[in-house]
Image (tube, rainbow, N blue to C red):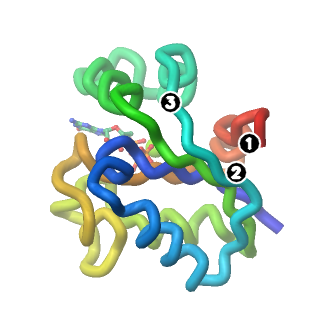
Amino acid sequence: VERTFVMVKPDGVQRGFVGDIIKRFEQKGLKIVGLKMLQISQELASKHYGEHQGKPFFEGLIKYITSSPVVAMVLEGKDCISLARGMMGATDPKKAAPGTIRETFGIDIGRNVIHGSDSAASAAREILPSF
Ligand code: GTP
Ligand code: MG
């Protein structure tokens, strides 16, 4: 079976959506195989979002993701990478499909509540060694 890396971002933690978000994954039948709250370091953030280095929103993105604790988890289940991404909805909450996590809880593209690996290669890279 497949595994994916999911992270409730600082805005999602601060605004109190951790329980609701976890519940959605549990209801979908995905298995939580790792879960923890942590403060993302500058170094980890730059590595995690390395593909976006040089883009105009990069610095703001790093500042945001390191601003306060996140809740990181590893989910397991058949096709869970695309399944979890689908449940999250489009990157921009304003464009996310009704009922998706980002549409329900997100405010704007820079405050979109949740991260999920976008491919098997990303999942392998993103799942923290401590999991
Ligand atoms: P993640 O799950 O966080 O990786 O989001 P994603 O895969 O849906 O989008 P992507 O990897 O392309 O972008 C990473 C993050 O950068 C997004 O979640 C946004 O918060 C932010 N981002 C992406 N594009 C833009 C943009 O055009 N403007 C701003 N302000 N932020 C952006
Ligand atoms: Mg991404």
Question: Which residue corresponds to mark 2?
Answer: 120
Q: Secondary structure at mark 2?
A: helix
- The kind of residue tagged 2 is Ala
69 up-or-down from 35: above or below: above
The residue beneath circle 3 is 39
Please give the name of the residue rendered at 17% of the width and 55% of the height, measured from the top-left corner: 107
Ligand 1 lies in quarter: top left
Mark in the foreground, 3 or 1: 3
Asked whether the beta carbons under mark 2 and mark 3 sit within 8 Å of each other, the answer is no
Distance Cα–Cα, label 2 vs label 1? 6 Å
Position of 130 with respect to 26 (left or right) is right
Q: Quadrant of the N terminus?
A: bottom right
Q: Which residue occupies the foreground of this view, 115 or 55? A: 115
Q: Is residue 87 left or right of residue 128?
A: left
* Label 3 within 8 A of ligand 1 by Cβ: no
Residue 50 appears anywhere in the view: no
Q: Residues within 10 Å of mark 3 (few under 14, many from 20)?
A: some
Helix, strand or loop under label 3: loop
Residue type at the position of mark 3: Gln
Mark 3 and mark 1 lie on one chain; the one further toward the N terminus is 3
Q: Residue beneath label 1, please?
A: 124
Return the x and y of residue 75 as percentages of the image width and height.
68, 62
SS at mark 1? Answer: helix
Q: CA distance from mark 2 to mark 3?
A: 24 Å
* CB contact under 8 Å: marks 2 and 1: yes
- What distance separates the C-alpha of mark 3 from that of mark 1? 20 Å
Residue plotted at (70% across, 41% down): 127
